[in-house]
Structures are given as structure tokens and as C-alpha cells.
Image (tube, rainbow, N blue to C red):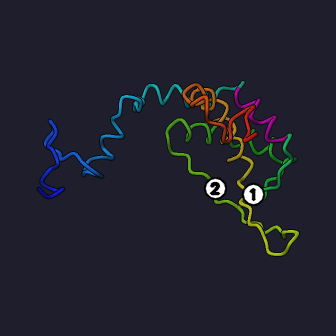
Amino acid sequence: MKAEDSRKVNASGEESGRNPEGALRGAETDATTRLRTKAESSELMEAVVERGNLMLAYQRVVRNKGAAGVDGIGITAFKNHLKQHWPTIKARLLAGEYIPQPVRRVDIPKPQGGVRTLGIPTLTDRLIQQALHQVLQPIFEADFSESSYGFRPGRNAH
């Protein structure tokens, strides 16, 4: 009997076996994977744009003293920029319509020659990334395996 002929057909009419069509669809509906409702997504974004979360994110972004992105807005002008533009940015975030700015490309020379290319987001995009991180990290951290160490708080390869 050929391998193709030995595959079984499951309840939904799909063939089982190695890489069957619909395997991705099955992964998406796995019991451990759950899609969020609009209300849950809205609640998460409300938590992201909550004043206390944003103040903490702002403090962390400013403390890093990073370079300006493509918009040219540096740390000194950032606070005034947010005062003027935050209501619009917040509304776009909550509506799911916010689009990040392009990333500024900077080449840094390596000690042994060559260059390393860095991508520098705008301070506004870094603020949003940090605010998202502060809300999402505790949610995902709870589900990570205890034996997972990559890019996790308080853990490293050693």
C-alpha cells in the first residue's frame, strides 16, 4: 500500500498525515491558542494608553536617551510633541488605525571592520512599544515554559 493511500480521513474530511492541508488551520484553533474578542482587545489597548502606564513608558524612553528617529524629534522636544499630538495618536491607537513611522537607518562601524546597521524608531513609536511591552509582557510571561530562558526578565543562558 502506498503512503498516500494509508492516510486516514478525520472527522472534518481532511486527510491526516505529514503536513496535511489545513494543518495551519488546526494550529490556529488549538486549545492553547485563543483569539481575543473585540472587547478584550479593546480592554488591552485601553490598558496600554492608560495614563499611569504611559507615564512609566515615557520615563523609561527618556531615561534611555536614544537618538531621534526619522521625524527628527529628540528627547528635549519630545514632551511638547506629545502634549500637542497625543490625543490624535491615542485615538488612532484605540481605533486600530495607528501606523508607525519608518525606522531611521544608521550604520555603526564594527571594531574588526565592516558596519552594523541599526534601525532607530521615532520616540513616539518607542513610547508605544514600551507601553505595549509593559501590558503584554506579564500576560505572556505567565504562559512561558519554566525551561525557557531567551529574552526573559531575570533569566539568561547561564
> What residue lies at 11% left-to-right and 56% top-to-bottom?
1
Q: Position of residue 75 (x, y in %)?
A: 85, 47
Q: Are marks 2 and 1 in contact (CB under 8 Å)?
A: yes
Q: Label 2: which residue?
A: 101
Decide which of 27, 18 is in the foreground and name it. 18
Please tell me which residue lies in front, 94 or 128.
Answer: 128
Residue pictured at 25% horizontal, 51% vertical:
20
The type of residue carrying mark 1 is Gly
Q: Secondary structure at mark 2?
A: loop
Q: Which residues are magenta?
A: 53-62
Q: Residues within 10 Å of mark 2 (few under 14, many from 20)?
A: some
Q: Please provide percent x and percent y for residue 65.
A: 86, 47
Against 118, residue 92 (above or below) is: above
Residue 113, numbered label: none
Q: Amino acid at mark 2?
A: Gln
Dominant secondary structure (helix, strand or loop) of the stretch shown in magenta: helix
- Residue 110: percent from left, percent from top: 84, 69
Where 133 falls versus 108 (above or below)? above
Question: Can you tell which quarter of the image residue 133 is in?
Answer: top right
Q: Residue at x 76, y 45 (%)?
A: 81
Residue 135 sits inside the magenta stretch: no
Among the 4 quarters of the image, the one containing residue 142: top right
Q: Is residue 114 above or below residue 93?
A: below
Report the quarter where the C terminus lies. top right
Q: Residue furthest front?
A: 1
Side (left or right) of 77 relative to 11: right
Query: Which element carries disc 1, helix, strand or loop?
Result: loop
The answer to which of marks 2 and 1 sits earlier in the sequence is: 1
* Residue receiving disc 1: 69
